[in-house]
Amino acid sequence: MKVQQSFDVDHPAETVWQALSDLELVAACMPGAELTGRDGDDYTGRIGVKLGPITARFSGKATIRRDDECYRGSVDGQGTDTGSGSRASASLSYAVEETGPGSSRVSIDSDIKLSGSLAQFGRSGIVNDVARQLTRDFSANLQARLNRPAGQGGEAAEAPPPQQAGEIEGFGLLFSVLWRRLVAPFRKLFGGGRDKGT
């Protein structure tokens, strides 16, 4: 399945790119993610999600490549959920572009493949809904990190992001996904706008 997401950040593209190049910071801003190791451009980690009664925790590895001059990068990763035996692989590209004085946009194009019992979520389209919610949470946490006031010596003051890394809470995410699906026909009927992160 193809997943396309984008979000805006109220900071210059160079600042956002530097933040996205810090994988420990990225993992801290992504709900459910944990970085466990690194060997050059190869990383290992885990990500967990609990969607209602369904719990999945993928462990795997990814290779990350970056073009620091063009603010573009790519990620190729794969992982396995030991509980269900499901496997996931993803290839994504991302880019940061300046959209105005002190503002930028991050665009992400993903190609995701699921196999095993969790593949049903790919067929139902719910993966796009989950990706949209995760993008909103991640962008809010990234913005909060970049907004932290500088401490002594000009370094950012130590403070946790609004949502720490850990298993993604399921019922709130499930409710928001179902709610958007329920109200979408009415929004189209009455001329409502599209979600920003699609």
Image (cartoon, rainbow, N blue to C red):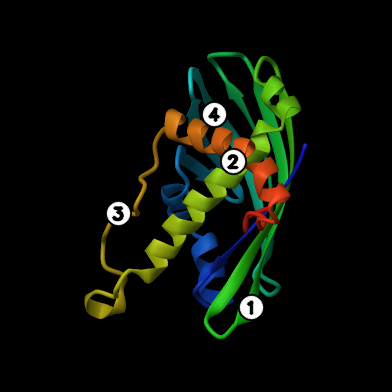
Mark nearer the viewer, 4 or 3 = 3
Taking the image as shown, residue 152 lies to the left or right of residue 47, namely left
Residues tagged 3 and 1 counted as in contact (Cβ below 8 A): no
Q: Earlier in the sequence, mark 4 or mark 2?
A: 4
Q: Give the numbered dot on residue 180.
A: 2
Q: In this view, which residue lies farthest toward the bottom?
A: 101
Please tell me whether mark 3 sits on a helix, a strand or a loop: loop
Specify the quadrant that holds the N terminus: top right
Q: CA distance from mark 4 to mark 2?
A: 29 Å
Residue 114: x %, y % from top left:
71, 26
Q: Amino acid at mark 2?
A: Arg
Q: Is residue 52 above or below residue 92?
A: above
Label 1: few (<14), some (14–19) or many (≥20) C-alpha neighbours in 10 Å: some
Q: CA distance from mark 1 to mark 4?
A: 36 Å
Please tell me whether mark 1 sits on a helix, a strand or a loop: strand
Residue 131: x %, y % from top left:
61, 42
Q: Amino acid at mark 1?
A: Thr
Q: Amino acid at mark 4?
A: Ser
Q: Give the numbered dot on residue 99.
A: 1
Residue 170 versus residue 191: which sits nearer the camera?
A: 191
Taking the image as shown, residue 139 lies to the left or right of residue 145, namely right
| Residue depicted at x 63% and y 54% | 195
Residue 2: x %, y % from top left:
77, 42
Q: In this view, which residue lies farthest toward the front?
A: 190
